[in-house]
Amino acid sequence: MRTCTSSSQLQAALQRARSEGQSIGFVPTMGNLHEGHLDLVRKARGLCDVVVVSIFVNPLQFGPNEDFDSYPRTLTADKEKLFAEGVQFLYAPGVEDVYPDGMEAQTVVSVPDLGDTLCGASRPGHFDGVTTVVNKLLNLVRPDAAIFGEKDFQQLSIVRKMVRDLCIPVQIVGVATTRDEDGLAKSSRNGYLSKQERRVAPLLHQTLANCRDAIACGFDNFLQLESHARMNLLKAGFEPDYFAIRDARTLRPVTDATEEVAILVAARLGKTRLIDNVRLSLNPVSDWGMLADG
Ligand code: PAF
């Protein structure tokens, strides 16, 4: 595995693969890799000849009071995992390589509407930071396919929209959420949880699953389902940021035109902010009530 710390090194290295006609799969990450990331890598390996992974804790997507400084940085262990998965190229730049003129002077890519709701409402500027860095990374790597986890369902929707709107020639591939046995979605931030919090954390997924099952059984008072779920989370010690039943395509409230529902949650447990989602098809003809886990 070749590690590049500058964009020029990376571009030169990839030029060779490209000239040999090899297809390139790309997995952007912020490191502290777990099974969820490795599932994305495996997907990329299955789709493409060459796999590029980036590890960059992107300051532009963190708010002033968020965990940028404490975000776990585990480059040595990450490299071992990527090597074992047969990754050919790692791009692990410093902030100066990604933002050579400084973050203030950086051109920003912003996806309206989809980026303004849910996590966009509670983390102002977060998705602009994500789309800006993902745009830069896609332009650098020029992959055939880029792989993202469905755990960050809003992020995936926003990246798909950006790629469509800006005609970026890449296939965006979503991969189902990897979970611990008790249902907790794998996340680098799970490492912040105390033992007691870790015991409570799976309730987030259970609450989503209960809500999904209620809808699948025909319960259609979504406001009541949302407030019941929020109440249960509060009782268990979470501070819910949102628990929302939305149209999976628009991320806006469900309408008669909704074909797929996404149930999304963000909640704080102690100092850890956790997110998760599940989806449910509402297609009345072929698969009403089919469950799609996210
Ligand atoms: O999902 C992440 O880890 C990050 O938001 C991403 C896509 C690597 C951009 O920094």
Image: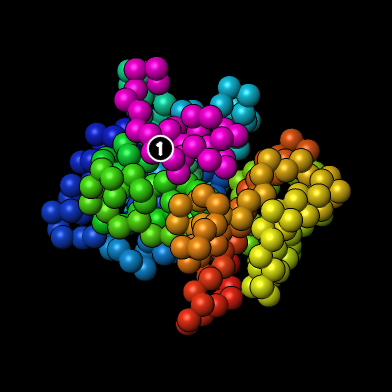
Q: Is residue 94 visible?
A: yes
Give the quarter of the image for residue 72: top right
Pick the residue in front: 269 or 253.
253
Q: Is residue 30 left or right of residue 198?
A: left
Relative vertical location of residue 33 with respect to residue 96 in this rendering, above or below? below
Relative vertical location of residue 205 with respect to residue 89 in this rendering, above or below? below
Residue at figure coordinates x 58%, y 22% from the top left: 64
Q: Is residue 143 left or right of residue 199?
A: left
The percent coordinates of residue 29 (x first, y second) are 46, 45
- Circle 1: element type: loop
Q: Which residues are magenta?
A: 103-131
Q: Is residue 262 left or right of residue 239?
A: left
Check disc 1 and report the residue beneath it: 112
Give the quarter of the image for residue 74: top right
Pick the residue in front: 172 or 194.
172
Whether 288 is among the magenta residues is no
The percent coordinates of residue 90 (x first, y second) are 38, 46
Residue at figure coordinates x 40%, y 21% from the top left: 103
Residue at figure coordinates x 74%, y 35% from the top left: 271
The percent coordinates of residue 246 (x first, y second) are 56, 54
Relative vertical location of residue 53 with respect to residue 239 in this rendering, above or below? below
Give the amino acid at mark 1.
Pro
Relative vertical location of residue 46 with respect to residue 101 in this rendering, above or below? below
Q: Is residue 183 visible?
A: no
Which image quarter is the C terminus in? bottom right
Pick the residue in front: 131 or 37.
131
The percent coordinates of residue 279 (x first, y second) are 56, 64
Residue furthest toward the bottom? 286
> How many C-alpha atoms fall within 10 Å of the one at disc 1: few (<14), some, or many (≥20)?
some
